[in-house]
Amino acid sequence: MRPGPIIALCGLAVAGAALNGCATLSEEQCVVGDWYGIGQGDGAQGRSHARLEEHIEACQRHGVTPDHLLYEQGRQQGLLSYCTPQSGFRVGRHGSGYDGVCPADLESDFLAGYSDGRLVHAVQSTYNEALNEEHRYLQRARDIEGQIRNEEAALGGPDLTDEQRRTIRGRIRQLRDDRERALDYARDAQWRMRDVERELYALRARFAAYYGSW
């Protein structure tokens, strides 16, 4: 087994508070004050203690001060579910970072899973890049095909001079070359995708016993 930083982002549920900054808690959450539960949830997401400062700022506008002790007790409990090899693998595979929050006795196992997850993420990213490239060049080939049809239609104009016809035929030849070049690039991307798919298959087989299917 093996392994990097969790970037703390504001929750989608508080998107409406964007004009007032990034409120981490609603008024109801502040007033109810389940600080152990809030801390536990943050710990389970790999949040550092600095997250509490954001909660303090969010609750100040409602006249509420978080209970630091209960929050930290909950966060430490939540970290027990976060700081595992399986969690590290999931975090790494999703391309997220690690904020150095795990206790010393759990960190090495977490980082082992994180390293494996980062390896999968890198291979998956390579596949996605090749896939996007394939789509881009296939679309380019389709666009050129449309231009070729337009030029061929123009070639049928009854009032064209011989010079104009030669010019149009030259454009058609160039467009056909461009189309074939785009298709070649798309085929290259497809071959890369096949190679990467084999890598992903090997990684699935290699890590299945540790992390299950993914």
Image (spheres, rainbow, N blue to C red):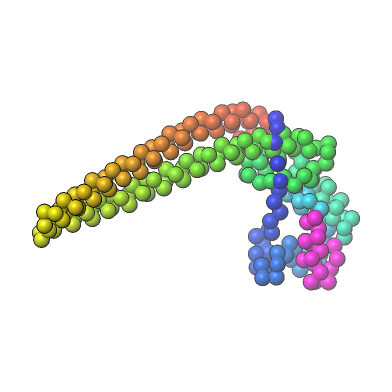
Residue at x 76% of width, y 41% of height = 83
Q: Quadrant of residue 84?
A: top right
Q: Is residue 185 magenta-colored?
A: no
- The residue lying furthest to the front in this view is 163
Q: Residue at x 23, y 50 (%)?
A: 171
Query: Is residue 38 among what the camera can see?
Result: no
- Is residue 62 positioned above or below 33 on the image? below
Per the image, is 64 magenta?
A: yes
Position of residue 73 in the picture relative to residue 165 (left or right):
right
Residue 76, position as x, y percentages in the image = 83, 47
Give percent across and percent down for residue 95.
63, 44
Residue 196 as seen in the image, left or right of residue 37: left
| Camera-side residue of 148 and 10 | 148
Image quadrant containing the C terminus: top right
> Which quadrant of the view contains residue 133?
top left
Give the extent of the magenta segment: 50-66
Spot occupied by residue 6 in the image (x, y as percentages of width and height): 71, 48
Residue at (77, 66) in percent of width and height: 58
Image x and y of residue 39, in percent? 81, 54
The N terminus, quarter of image = top right
Task: Specify whether residue 65 is in view.
Answer: yes
Seen from the viewer's position, the closer of residues 170 and 214 is: 170
Compared to residue 210, the image places residue 101 above or below, namely below
Please give the name of the residue rendered at 37% of the width and 49% of the height, measured from the top-left corner: 139
The reply, left or right, for residue 2 in relation to residue 74 is left
The total of numbered circles placed on residues is 0
Furthest toward the right, the residue is: 69
